[in-house]
Amino acid sequence: MPSEAFDYPLGIRLWPRERQHAQFSPREGYSFSLLENSSDSYRFTALAGASKISSIFQSFARLISEEAFFILEFYDQETDPEQDTQARPSVYYSSCLTTSEIMTALEPFLPRLIHDGFVGFGLANNRLGMELFYSEEKVLTCFTGSHLRITNLLNRHGIPYLPDLSYPTDFGHDHLSLLCLPEQELPESLRNLEDKELDYLNFCNQIIDLLDMYPVDDSCSFYLSKKEQDAIEARLQQSSEFAFFAEEDFGSLLLDWNDFVCDCEDGFEGDLWEYREGLKLRDMLQFVVEGVPADLRRKILEIIAEADDRFQKNLTDRRKRLDPPQSPTLREDSFWYRGVVSKQGVDLRRDLIRHGWFKP
């Protein structure tokens, strides 16, 4: 396929000299391989024309059944020229919603999401272990344990298997905001929009409000396969205390622990009961860790390692313990009960005083 014919999104513009590169031959296609340290999960990487992205996402939405969450990635802060560090995009997740609700809400935004060079977006169902993401580099990445379903989906949209693809990241290129483009270069569906509507900062924040999305630390990025989620569910079912959470998305519980740690770092504003609920969440994670296969145990511990480290650094008075009267039976020491967070709000400090924590 000649380079001029490839349907690149408007937000990616290859440097003219790169088009003369001997190896430059942009074509639609995909490749896939097993994820590292996995025997049943795959990573797909695909290049598809801009005109096909919307229909591919619609097909994927039908594939992951009734529920999903939306992922949005964009640069919501300007780069400081005095700093050497490269700006990183912010990541937002929606809560779990029906896929039809998400796709209906996104319909008027999809052309802008697809074409703007500073935006990436995706759709995922953690419980099924399936995620599809379209990056700011305008490359599709899919994680799945059902590789045949994804190969069939891509083939239905005319995307062939081509292991030696060239991607925009292989060549010099620029990222463009839709605001940079003359009106005549925009797709017909975008030509009547005002500048404010074409500004990705504006329409991304509209989507955040529409889907009630929340920011996620990119260090919390992880993937759990359906097989791993099934093992976690079986483990939680073994506990009368934690069985209620067995059918929950375990990925959300991992994010909840990180959120609790962040709240403690900022200054915990809840009371002692709410603080202990956060500690019980870590009990549940530990209960899972101690009862799943070794590979999954290591994976979960790696996911929560940073949050655990930050929480331990925030603890003070660690010679004392704050264990509840009926603590679950865990084999390993529960470090999260040794001491209490240093930044205590009024309610937590009041309850700690009432419970005799600050004895002379």
Image (cartoon, rainbow, N blue to C red):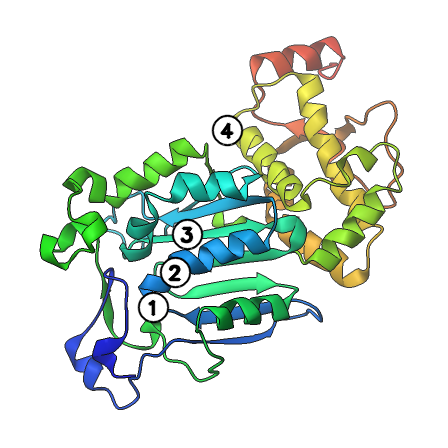
In this rendered view, identify the residue nearer to me: 341 or 327. Answer: 327
Residue occupied by mark 3: 121
In this rendered view, identify the residue nearer to me: 84 or 198. Answer: 198
Give amino acid for label 3: Phe
Disc marking residue 53: 2
Give amino acid for label 4: Asp
- Mark 2 and mark 1 in contact (Cβ < 8 Å)? yes
Secondary structure under the numbered disc 2 in the rendered image: helix
In this rendered view, identify the residue nearer to me: 246 or 241. Answer: 246
Instruction: Give the tally of numbered discs.
Output: 4
- Calculate the distance from the C-alpha at mark 2 to the C-alpha at mark 3: 11 Å
Give amino acid for label 2: Ile
Task: Determine the residue positioned at 46% across, 47% down.
Answer: 71
* Quadrant in the picture for the C terminus: top right
Q: Quadrant of residue 104?
A: top left
Secondary structure under the numbered disc 1 in the rendered image: loop
